[in-house]
Image: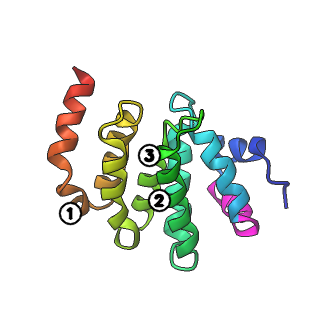
Amino acid sequence: MATITKRVIRELVGENDIEGLSRLFEEDPSQVRRYLVRLAFDPDDPIHEPLLDAITFLCKRTSAELDEFWRETIRRQLWSMNEEGANIPWSAPELIGAVIAGDPKRFGMYFSFNFEAAKDEPTFQPSLVRAYDRVAAADAELAASFSEPIERLRASLAG
């Protein structure tokens, strides 16, 4: 097995080698998550969307057996959005959305927490809109109750 490093994870995602990424995830889910999360913080990085797609895929594939792992992933991102430290997790709402989109039935209840944590913070609003889009594509019914405030937010961001 390849050594799990940030560079290796970036290469696998950049090459869309989801099976290679899956093998590393089976070996050490926490280490892979660590690098996926770190790499996802830059919304302008060309691999940003593929990283989120990879998280959704990994969650979809493993949510039943790694339920608590994925709940912890969501909790960590919610916590980071409320932290008063110097780090700003710009993409935390999208990371949460990627997990929810991986298994909306299991994790959909967390979208309301994501929404409440991000809606009034300009730093997180663009990421929240993108998280909503990802969740809506996975489960339109789940996203429906958030559509009106998200569309208002989307309009204000465009405006």
Residue 26 within the magenta-colored segment of the rendering: yes
Q: Secondary structure at mark 3?
A: helix
Q: Earlier in the sequence, mark 3 or mark 1?
A: 3
**Is the magenta region chiefly helix, strand or loop?**
helix
Question: What amino acid is at disc 3?
Answer: Glu
Query: Distance of mark 2 from mark 1, alpha carbons?
Result: 17 Å
Quadrant showing the N terminus: bottom right
Magenta range is: 18-28
Please give left or right for residue 39 compared with residue 61 in the image. right
Residue nearest the viewer, comparing 19 with 110: 110
How packed is label 3: few (under 14 Cα within 10 Å), some, or many (20 or more)?
many
How packed is label 1: few (under 14 Cα within 10 Å), some, or many (20 or more)?
few
Query: Distance of mark 2 from mark 3, alpha carbons?
Result: 9 Å
Q: Which mark is residue 94?
A: 3
Query: Distance of mark 3 from mark 1, alpha carbons?
Result: 19 Å
- Please indicate, yes or no, whether residue 8 appears anywhere in the rendered image: yes
Q: Secondary structure at mark 2?
A: helix
Instruction: Kindly identify which residue carries mark 2.
Output: 99
Question: What amino acid is at disc 1?
Answer: Glu
Work out whether 28 lies above or below 93: below
Check contact, mark 3 vs mark 1: CB within 8 A: no
Residue 110 x %, y %: 37, 62
Please give left or right for residue 130 compared with residue 142 in the image. right
Q: Which quadrant of the view contains residue 158?
A: top left
Residue found 31% across the figure and 46% down from its top: 133
Residue 46 x %, y %: 56, 31
Instruction: Kindly identify which residue carries mark 1.
Output: 141
Please give left or right for residue 43 compared with residue 6 in the image. left
Q: Secondary structure at mark 1?
A: helix
* Marks 3, 1: nearer the viewer: 3
Question: What amino acid is at disc 2?
Answer: Val
